[in-house]
Image: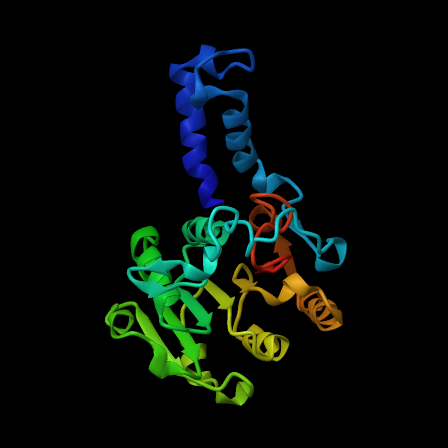
Amino acid sequence: MKLASEHQAFWDAGHKNYPDQMRSDGFGGQLFSPKALDGIKAVLSADHSDRFARPSDRDWMSSIYPWTGDQRATKIGALAKTYRGLIIYKTPFDLALYPRLIWELQPRTILELGSCQGGSGLWFADNMSVLCERLGEVHSFDLYIELVHENAKKHPLLSFHQIDLSDVANFDEKLLAGLPHPWLVIDDAHVQIFSVFSYLNKFLVSGDYYVIEDNPVFANKEIIDGFQLIERAGYLIDTYYTDAFGTNVTCASNAWLRKS
């Protein structure tokens, strides 16, 4: 786990240089508080815990509904968020989670389904350019490609593709087959999500991630049946992301998925 290596460095340096503060009864202010040290230990032990779970073993309840979690002080909340002046429909929780996953996964390819104005694609491309040791590509797919702002199209790592996602035959199979791994796929289009998943799954390999935003929150029969398909395909829920701020406090309830 790439995240753990940096936390391990802090842990080792603390024990070497500040052993008294690192003790369970030590006092070192907020930096060495029991809660702060417990958080570090949680990262260090993440790969040796029950981090990954089968969809059939999980409840669909959420501690906080993420699309209203930031509306307590404003009337609009997440729906008014922008990035570099462009619309970005992401909750504050997910804006914190994606950079963590990009750092850990080091994706060579990010596939975004649903482009809107291009703000989220631009955000993913900027995160990749800062956080990834080897630069990759962001490919964003949408039917209404004319809504994408020119400023988003200028990013050297970001490409937009016009496609009707209601028919998976519209994907460019040659393009997908040539994209390097690891992959991070984000479905924010809400169009035939399980048909699209089944098609793209043919191109994903072990360790790739697939995030389905928004739709799983409803947990209706279509979602439950679809997640049985996902489980049969060998995907596990990464609870390190779904439960980082509380159970399923994310727009992708039970849907931060890692191919095993």
Q: Is residue 5 above or below residue 218?
A: above
Q: Report the residue at 64% width, 61% height from top.
A: 217
Who is closer to the viewer here, 183 or 112?
Answer: 112
Q: Residue 10, how many percent across, how many down?
A: 41, 28
41 over 56 or under it: above or below: above
Q: Is residue 111 above or below residue 92?
A: below
**Nearest the eye: 148 or 170:** 148
* Quadrant of the drawing holding the C terminus: bottom right
Q: Which residue lies at the image location 54% right of the left edge and 25% below the top edge?
A: 35
Q: How many marks?
A: 0
x and y, in percent, of residue 142 in the image: 43, 79
Q: What residue appears at the point 40 percent right and 30 percent down from the top-left corner?
A: 9
Q: In the image, is 97 to the left or to the right of 232?
A: left
Toward which corner of the image does residue 250 lie, by quadrant?
A: bottom right
Task: Inspect this view and state whether residue 90 appears.
Answer: no
Rendered position, 190 above or below 72: below
Residue 56 or 6: which is nearer the viewer? 56
Residue appearing at x 74%, y 53% in the figure: 59
Q: Position of residue 256 (x, y in %)?
A: 57, 57
Residue 149: percent from left, percent from top: 29, 74
Colouring style: rainbow
